Structures are given as structure tokens and as C-alpha cells.
Image (spheres, rainbow, N blue to C red):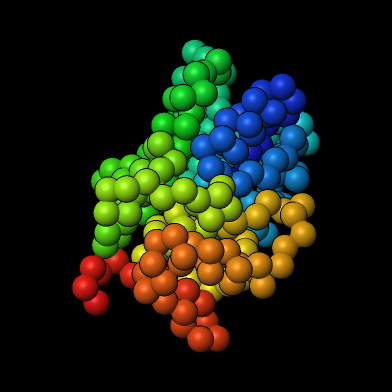
């Protein structure tokens, strides 16, 4: 899952970035409203963490513009404590959740999981896919009850496929959601990573749809 983190407080941005990375997300960062708007407009994020007090363009305006342009990604706003009017303005502008500063990192991660869960139409942090169980909270994967050791890239790819299980995901889409903006992307590496995951979870679990992409199969005996 790829997250856009918009925060002009450098220390906070770094701390949140580290926490997101540790939780298995890929993150792009922006420290002003203009860059944030541009990134959210042009890159496919799975969720956005948006500070409201930002240089150049404020967070509320950024959010309003995205929503006006039909961008539907979940957005969690970071607000100043005790400013209820800011929260109301944020929700009116199209925010899905808010967190008042200062906050505990665990709460931010929990709220983010909840947003992604809702966006994916799931009721829990666990994704079941045939014999596979993916615990997105603990960033763990179990195959018939036994832990599967995956690299962080393999984990991210599998989670992305699991969110879209039984539908075909193109290599381009995978590339866009697995790597941050400044990464030198090469969609051929996707095939290599898929190969490594297949070795760990069983080749038949991931189907190649020639010329289109990949599907994670959720049925057990199919
Ligand atoms: Ca700020």
C-alpha cells in the first residue's frame, strides 16, 4: 500500500515516515500544499495523511481540490488539538478521519488500517485467501497456520494482491503501489518478486493472466 504523507514539521514527518515503513507501507512525502496537491492529483495513493496547517496552500484547500476533481482515496487529517472548527471544516472538505496532535504513533497506524480496511470493504485486519491468512496489523502471513517468511517487498506485493484478490492486477498498477515516487521503477522486477512469492506460498496461488497481470486466487480447491 502506498501512502502520501503531507506534513511540514520535519521531525514529525520523519517519525511518521519511519513508523509507516515499519508497518509495511511505501511512503511519499510532501511538506507544502502545492506539492501535496500535485502528488495526490497524479499518483495513485491508497491513503493520504494530511496535515492542515501547511505552507503555500493549506490542507483544507488541498483536500477540497482533490475531492472536486473526483479523487476518492481515504484521507486522514492531522489537526491541532481542541480546534473543533478545524475538524468540522476537514470533514466538510472530504476527510475520512482525523487525529489531533500530539498523537501516539500506534493510534495513527490503527486509524490508517481502519481506513484501508473500509476502503477495501473488509471487516477485520486479517485477509483470508484460501489457505493464506494475512494479518495486516502484525504484518504477518500464515500459510495453513505456519508463518511464511517474506521480504518487505514481497509482503507489500502480496498484501496488494490480497486486497484485490480474485481480480486481475496489472504490473503497472503493482509498480505504482509498491514503490515510492523517487524509486527507479522497473516493472520487470515485479515478475521476479512474484516468482519468489510463488515459491513460498505455492505457484498455483498466483495466476498469471498473460499480457494483463496477476490474480491471487482465494478459492482453496480451484
Ligand atoms: Ca503544520
- The residue lying at 74 percent from left, 25 percent from top is 10
Q: Position of residue 82 (x, y in %)?
A: 49, 13
The vertical placement of 163 against 36, above or below, is: below
- The residue lying at 38 percent from left, 67 percent from top is 202
Q: How many labels sit on residues?
A: 0
Q: Position of residue 130 (x, y in %)?
A: 26, 62
The vertical placement of 195 against 69, above or below, is: below
Nearer to the camera, 133 or 212: 133
Residue 60 falls in which quadrant of the image? top right
- The residue lying at 46 percent from left, 48 percent from top is 149
Residue 96 visible to an observer of this rendering: no
The vertical placement of 3 against 69, above or below, is: above
Residue 204 falls in which quadrant of the image? bottom left
Kindly give the residue lying farthest to the left in the view shown: 221
Q: Position of residue 183 (x, y in %)?
A: 74, 54
Kindly give the residue lying farthest to the bottom in the view shown: 210
- The residue lying at 63 percent from left, 38 percent from top is 5
Nearer to the camera, 100 or 175: 175
Q: Position of residue 32 (x, y in %)?
A: 75, 36
Amino acid at each position: 500500500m502506498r501512502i502520501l504523507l503531507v506534513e511540514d514539521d520535519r521531525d514529525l514527518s520523519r517519525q511518521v515516515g519511519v513508523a509507516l515503513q515499519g508497518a509495511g507501507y511505501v511512503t511519499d512525502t510532501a511538506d507544502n500544499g502545492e506539492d501535496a496537491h500535485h502528488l495526490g492529483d497524479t499518483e495513485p495513493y491508497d491513503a493520504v495523511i494530511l496535515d492542515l496547517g501547511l505552507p503555500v496552500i493549506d490542507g483544507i484547500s488541498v483536500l477540497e481540490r482533490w475531492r472536486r476533481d473526483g479523487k476518492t482515496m481515504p484521507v486522514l487529517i492531522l489537526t491541532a488539538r481542541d480546534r473543533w472548527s478545524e475538524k468540522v471544516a476537514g470533514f466538510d472538505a472530504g476527510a475520512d478521519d482525523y487525529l489531533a496532535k500530539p498523537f501516539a504513533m500506534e493510534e495513527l497506524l490503527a486509524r490508517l488500517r481502519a481506513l484501508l480496511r473500509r476502503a477495501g470493504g473488509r471487516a477485520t485486519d486479517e485477509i483470508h485467501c484460501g489457505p493464506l491468512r494475512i494479518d495486516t496489523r502484525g504484518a504477518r502471513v500464515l500459510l495453513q497456520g505456519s508463518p511464511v517468511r517474506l521480504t518487505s517487498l514481497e509482503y507489500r506485493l502480496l498484501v496488494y494482491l490480497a486486497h484485490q484478490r480474485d481480480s486481475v492486477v496489472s504490473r503497472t498498477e503493482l509498480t505504482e503501489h509498491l514503490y515510492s515516487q523517487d524509486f527507479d521503477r522497473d516493472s520487470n522486477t515485479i515478475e521476479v518478486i512474484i516468482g519468489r512469492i510463488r515459491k513460498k506460498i505455492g505457484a498455483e496461488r498466483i495466476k498469471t493472466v498473460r499480457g494483463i497481470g496477476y490474480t491471487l486466487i482465494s478459492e482453496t480447491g480451484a
